[in-house]
Amino acid sequence: MQVHSSAGPANDQPVPVGEAEGVSKTFGETRALIDVSLNVLSGECHGLVGRNGAGKSTLVTLLTGLARPDRGTIRLSAQAAPSLADRGAWLAKVACVYQKSMVVPPLTVAENVFLNRPTNGERSPVVNWRRMRERAHDVMLEWGFDIDVDQEAGRLTVEQRQIVEIARALSIGARFLILDEPTASLEKAAVERLFDRVRRLREGGVGILYISHHLEEIYEICDRVSVLRDGELVLSGQVAKVSQENLVAAMIGNAPPRSASEIDAVDEVGALGERRLQVSHLSVRSRSGSVDDVSLEVRAGECLGLLGLEGSGSSTVADAVVGLIKPAAGTISINGKVVPPGKVDAVLRLGVGYVPQDRHARGFAPQLGVGENITLSVLDRISRNVLGVVSSEARDRIAEEQASKLQIVARSLDQPVASLSGGNQQKVVVGRALAPNPSVLVVVNPTVGVDVASKEALLDAVGQARTAGMAVLLVSDDFEDLRICTRLQVMVRGKTAGEFERPPWDRQRLIAAVEGLQPAGVDQG
Amino acid sequence: MTDTTAGRPAKKSGSEVGRRNWRLTILSWFRELTLVPVIVVLMIAGAIVNPVFFTTSNLINVAEGGAALGMVVVAESLILLTGKFDISLQGTFGLAPLLGAWLIAPKASEGLGTQWNPWVGLLVVLAVGLIVGTFNGFLVIKANFNAFIFTLAMSILLTGLQLGWLGGQTIYDLPAAFIYIGSESWFGIPVSVWITVATFAVAAAFLRYHRVGRAMYAIGGSLEAARAAGIKVDRIRIGVFMVASVLAAVGGLMQAGRVTAVTAGQGSNLIFGVFAAAVIGGISLEGGRGRMVGALTGVILLSLVTNILTLSSISSTWIDAVDGAIILIALGLARIIGTEHV
């Protein structure tokens, strides 16, 4: 398999490098894709957009041979797709660069490029290091990637790891690349360099399916764009001919069942109390989304919704507030006291309740009962005696109060949390955060993976806490969560991209702001 | 392993690749040879402690003691590189030669009395290794048992079988062919040392220059990435368990040959030294990192320590404590130098 060391631009006549024709895929009850047809031509960058759950990732698994469509066909380079078992044949045609890095850290760049491929002739199992390094180097030179092939991959930046994965695909001979949210964890300069790379790949005859939440990127780099909504292809066309309004409208679709285009929101905001949480000029460097000079404040009786996509830095702000991550610059104060950076216990003692993003990792102790989990945050209060022995009466009283407020469905307060449904587990996590009656509540994506009834109960409980005078910071990318908010702040790529005072808010304008578009009329912060 | 393009006319891009590589090559060798200064210091200490240390017979003795340990260290290192481990290697180290010896030794010397051909006995030794390794591999990789608890239980089982079988006795009076690799010498150096050195060399070359060897690093470095690249991860990982157990069985054979007997206690507590040698030699417990050269320096270091402590005037009851302290110091040293560049 001599590598195409001269992948000369052969883009006189664009040919489809990847096609889905009338594909459908069903998982259990969910119809993930319904009769979707889409093709990517050589030398083209084809944007694919859609809200979470629209079917983008299902389409990617079909196009990369990780699953087979129930109906319809997949073609690569105008040939029928190989069987799923033949990974090598798929890898030679198509590659997807996921957000999650697929390089092997302890190996060198050259080895990663030639992972599991012969380097000393087709049949020889011998690794020819010299040839491998030279060829990896040639691939880098040819496509203009500036990476030392002898470096250990574990020391590369996110951007460089992406390059290694792209180089690997190109050197196998794949001319169909899928980039899944490639800019999610890149900084601005790196994004520009990525765009240069995409243009160069396009000129070299590579077809790219570009998946992104950031619509402005689609306009900058893509030739065509397709929109998926609820598993269906609802729009496809030349980027130049699709207006931003139409694109956003296609993503959202018709009026959501709850209301027309406005988001349900609290009716009366009520009087605001003193300033409880203040974040000023916060900057944080983080793999999961850096924060760049963000300021915000939350007063008693207020719920600030911090809205942003994954990687926008919104959840990093929450991590910094509760002390899980040390800020590079800026200050955070709670009730006027500056919080010590990076000390979770100290922050929580200042009166902060915290509902973490990943309830399985940080939320609860799975083997412990509902009551014990809820009262973990108030152990000092329920063991007020010399010996520090926990009073089961005090524990049950507090646990019962929270359990009834949140409508937790459990056989008893002793039932292990691990055996509860996702919704009830999340209620336990929220109950634990509310039990000490904190002055500030930080909530991150509280309703992810939760059934509808639990969602309502959870949001109601947080809403009631706010009405009772708590200051709430709600970090979310789910618009349904916003109905309990009294004010919104939108983050895009680590910066504040807009602020929305007082509900009601217009769904379309919010989406435009979150996706990084800037239509006229957004209240600039 | 050394730079192959340097000093040789190569095409332009090639020579550029070669030049850049020098710095990294030296750096990685430096990392592998962290323990060399420690070994030098130990040798000086040995010479001071007891003049017997620098005699040929003592150094051969050190090498012979290290040979059996070294086989198991190679075995464990291979498994560690793929991100798993196997505690029961010490059980195989004891049980495999025991079964072989039992079938070939006369009844008078605690054998079964069948007195089979010694070559059959050798095959039995290897077969026991293969069977235990296959069993471990399938259950840890395919059935997804936790490697720690599963191989620990397996180790207890094997050691228990060994003890029960012999009833605390020792099988002795073994045929010459059976004890050959543990008792004979070629050119003045024990056969076991030749075999272990060759095993290290073959393993090192395989890991460096064979596709499957590189795939093992990829599997240990990132299982998902290896799988996505089309590497047959389960097949390789099970194969590594099998090879490792066979190597451990051969190590056991060396030990048996050296003392010309199989004791009921052969192999017990061996695994701690094995892990210590591998880890201070730079094999990562997380998988995917480390080289055979490093593991070899780990074996040399541990063997020297044992020898010097024996030669010294330290009371034998204190030897374990000193042994442990030296391992801790070596670990700390390896950590400091290792992480500095990672």
Image (cartoon, helix red, strand yellow):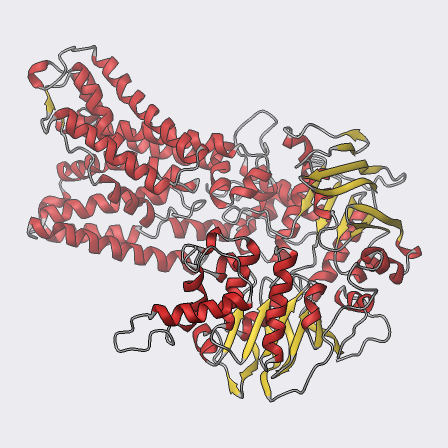
Quadrant for the C terminus of chain A, please: bottom right
Q: Nearer the viewer, residue B71 or A386?
A: A386
| Residue B284 falls left or right of residue A189 | left
Please count the marks in the image: 0
Image height check: is A6 above or below A495?
above
Kindly tell me whether residue B210 is visible in this rendering: no
Q: Nearer the viewer, residue A359 or B71?
A: A359
Kindly tell me whether residue A359 is visible in this rendering: yes
State the image quarter where residue B82 is shown. top left
Q: Nearer the viewer, residue A348 or A3?
A: A348
Residue found at the far right of this picture: A241
| Residue A488 falls left or right of residue B262 | right
Residue drawn at (55%, 49%) of the image: A150
Question: Residue A34, position in %: x, y?
Answer: 79, 41
Question: Residue B220, position in %: x, y?
Answer: 46, 43
Question: Residue A33, position in %: x, y?
Answer: 76, 42
Residue drawn at (63%, 73%) of the image: A463
Q: Nearer the viewer, residue A342 or B319?
A: A342
Question: Residue B20, position in %: x, y?
Answer: 56, 51
Quadrant for the N terminus of chain A, please: top right
Image height check: is A291 above or below B1?
below
Image height check: is A473 above or below B260?
below
